[in-house]
């Protein structure tokens, strides 16, 4: 006998926690609505679509509950750098410490919560893709709304397949326990679904119906496809999609690397897609955790400096020392001293400050800084990497892409310095190594490093050299399937040798 699942006032909940454990939420976003009386009007369709974005940011649970925010609240960008040679963990929590040291197991709570957050977003997106098309409303607007959430669903499955490999592939609203207890699908089928979502979104997103910031565009779909195809090893398709983004010139590089992280430049210029946060304008608690987790502690003095910073994730010496001292990115990415209005100065070991717009948020507390998910420099280096793979060595366009990124790093805010000269004459492997290094300097704490090391087969080598206390192994190219999820869902297998 099939068991019917009721929503009890929720639009959706995480498939594998709500359906399997009946973990009713005490606090939910304002946009959460009752599915039994909903999905009747255009207003309902818009509200349901907007609700999906809440799962990306503040999440569905109270901020001080176990979930502690959505995907991009902190773990998306924290995971990728502590699971690498870029950063080390200082927080007392063993859940983060074991990730930093590569001693985590399938019982790690942070991995479990990340899995659950992925499937909460997927579940919310599935409800919209199934129910909104049934609403009698303007067809083009209806398709646009569905296209938005299919883009978000593609993002979540891209995250799932890269972190966990095979994973449940659920593309329809789940209303029965039998449907919720899905087995893991092959990586190939997951990638196929990701591409299908992105192609459909690209073809149905419309400028006429886009509202607000942090919404996908057709170019964002194309950009993400270039990254997806690169991970798939489909290098020509990756290059083709990257070329469309670059040649369109819709998102030109900022002249100064520092401009990327100024609040007035949010969702403009080089930024192709960002997850929108607001620490001041939202209802409730909706800033992200950049300043809390990254800025140095104990800087507040006389009403100046951050009051709520703990410096939990700090750069490794290996990362900091890898930069040319005159590289603009080093100056923007790190902070090593702070001067107060009385001209007194405090110095400290390097901390990550690239997301702190000191002019607009001088106290560095709650932040309106978005989480940048796609930007042009990323796609330029994807293009260069794909061309190197296609041709077994760099082409003139591949050199052009990486050298433009390097040229910007030579600009110190006023003049171009004679550092980081243009690359030329490299072999296939030398150019591949150069791409990996350039991406390291460019994307500190932007959710990239772990995947870059895994894709290029450098995880064990690089982490072992940078973090003596870490013990990475070859199997760490995937995370374990959370044991609690396996206890609830008997159809879930485990990654070896977890």
Image: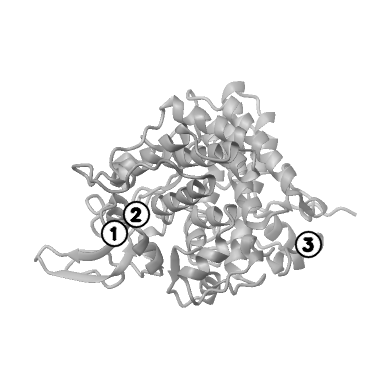
The vertical placement of 443 against 389, above or below, is below
Q: Residue furthest left?
A: 342
Residue at 66% from the left image edge and 57% from the top image edge: 164
Circle 2: is it few (<14), some (14-19), or many (20+) Cα within 10 Å? many
User: What residue is disc 2 on?
Assistant: 367
Against 292, is 218 above or below?
A: above
* Mark 3 or mark 1, whichever is nearer to me: 3
334 relative to 434 in the view: left or right: left
What is the C-alpha distance between the residues marked 1 and 2? 7 Å
- Badge 3 or badge 2: first in the primary sequence: 2
How far across and down, in percent of the image, does residue 248 sit? Answer: 45, 25
436 sits to left or right of 158: left
Can residue 44 be seen here? no
Q: Between residues 369 and 192, which one lies in front from this camera angle?
A: 192
Q: Quadrant of the C terminus?
A: bottom right
Question: 322 or 22: nearer the eye?
Answer: 322
How packed mark 1 is, by other alpha carbons closer than 10 Å (few <14, some 14-19, many 20 or more), is many
Q: Residues within 10 Å of mark 3 (few under 14, many from 20)?
A: some
Disc 1 and disc 2 in contact, CB within 8 angstroms: yes
Specify the quadrant of the image occupied by residue 108: bottom right
Residue at 53% across, 53% down? 452
Mark 3 vs mark 2, CA separation in Å: 40 Å
Q: x%, y% of residue 193?
A: 70, 39
**Distance of label 3 from label 1 (alpha carbons):** 44 Å
Location of mark 3 (residue): 493
Residue 484 x, y percent position in the rendering: 70, 68
Residue 135: give its label. Answer: none
Q: Is residue 2 above or below residue 131?
A: below
Q: Which residue is mark 1?
A: 364
């Amino acid at each position: 006998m099939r068991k019917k699942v009721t929503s009890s006032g929720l639009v959706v909940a995480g498939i594998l926690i709500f359906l399997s454990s009946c973990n009713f939420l005490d606090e939910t976003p304002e946009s959460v609505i009752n599915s039994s009386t909903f999905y009747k009007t255009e207003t309902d369709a818009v509200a349901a679509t907007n609700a999906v974005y809440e799962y990306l940011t503040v999440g569905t649970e109270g901020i001080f509950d176990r979930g502690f925010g959505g995907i991009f609240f902190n773990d998306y960008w924290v995971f990728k750098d502590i699971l690498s040679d870029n950063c080390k963990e200082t927080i007392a929590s063993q859940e983060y410490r074991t990730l930093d040291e590569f001693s985590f197991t399938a019982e790690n709570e942070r991995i479990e919560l990340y899995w659950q957050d992925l499937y909460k977003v997927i579940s919310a997106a599935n409800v919209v893709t199934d129910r909104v098309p049934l609403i009698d409303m303007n067809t083009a607007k209806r398709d646009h709304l569905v296209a938005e959430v299919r883009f978000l669903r593609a993002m979540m499955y891209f995250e799932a397949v890269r972190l966990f490999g095979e994973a449940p592939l659920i593309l329809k609203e789940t209303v029965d326990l039998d449907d919720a207890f899905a087995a893991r699908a092959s990586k190939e089928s997951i990638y196929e679904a990701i591409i299908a979502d992105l192609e459909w979104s690209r073809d149905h997103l419309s400028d006429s119906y886009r509202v607000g910031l942090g919404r996908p565009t057709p170019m964002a779909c194309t950009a993400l496809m270039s990254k997806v195809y690169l991970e798939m090893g489909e290098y020509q398709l990756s290059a083709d999609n990257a070329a469309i983004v670059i040649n369109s010139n819709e998102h030109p590089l900022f002249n100064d690397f520092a401009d990327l992280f100024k609040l007035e430049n949010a969702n403009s210029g080089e930024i192709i897609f960002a997850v929108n946060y607001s620490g001041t304008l939202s209802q409730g608690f909706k800033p992200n955790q950049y300043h809390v987790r990254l800025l140095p502690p104990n800087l507040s003095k006389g009403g100046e400096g951050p009051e709520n910073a703990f410096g939990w994730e700090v750069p490794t010496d290996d990362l900091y020392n890898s930069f040319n001292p005159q590289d603009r990115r080093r100056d923007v990415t790190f902070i090593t001293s702070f001067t107060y209005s009385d001209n007194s100065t405090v110095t400290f070991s390097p901390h990550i400050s690239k997301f702190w717009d000191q002019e607009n948020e001088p106290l560095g507390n709650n932040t309106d800084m978005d989480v940048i998910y796609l930007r042009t420099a990323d796609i330029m280096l994807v293009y260069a990497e794909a061309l190197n793979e296609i041709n077994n060595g760099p082409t003139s366009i591949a050199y052009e892409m990486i050298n433009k990124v390097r040229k910007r790093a030579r600009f110190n805010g006023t003049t171009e310095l004679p550092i980081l000269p243009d690359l030329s004459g490299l072999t296939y492997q030398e150019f591949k190594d150069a791409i990996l290094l350039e991406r390291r300097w460019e994307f500190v704490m932007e959710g990239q490093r772990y995947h870059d090391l895994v894709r290029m087969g450098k995880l064990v080598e690089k982490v072992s050299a940078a973090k003596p206390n870490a013990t990475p192994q070859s199997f760490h190219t995937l995370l374990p399937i959370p044991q609690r999820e396996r206890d609830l869902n008997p159809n879930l297998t485990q990654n070896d040798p977890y």
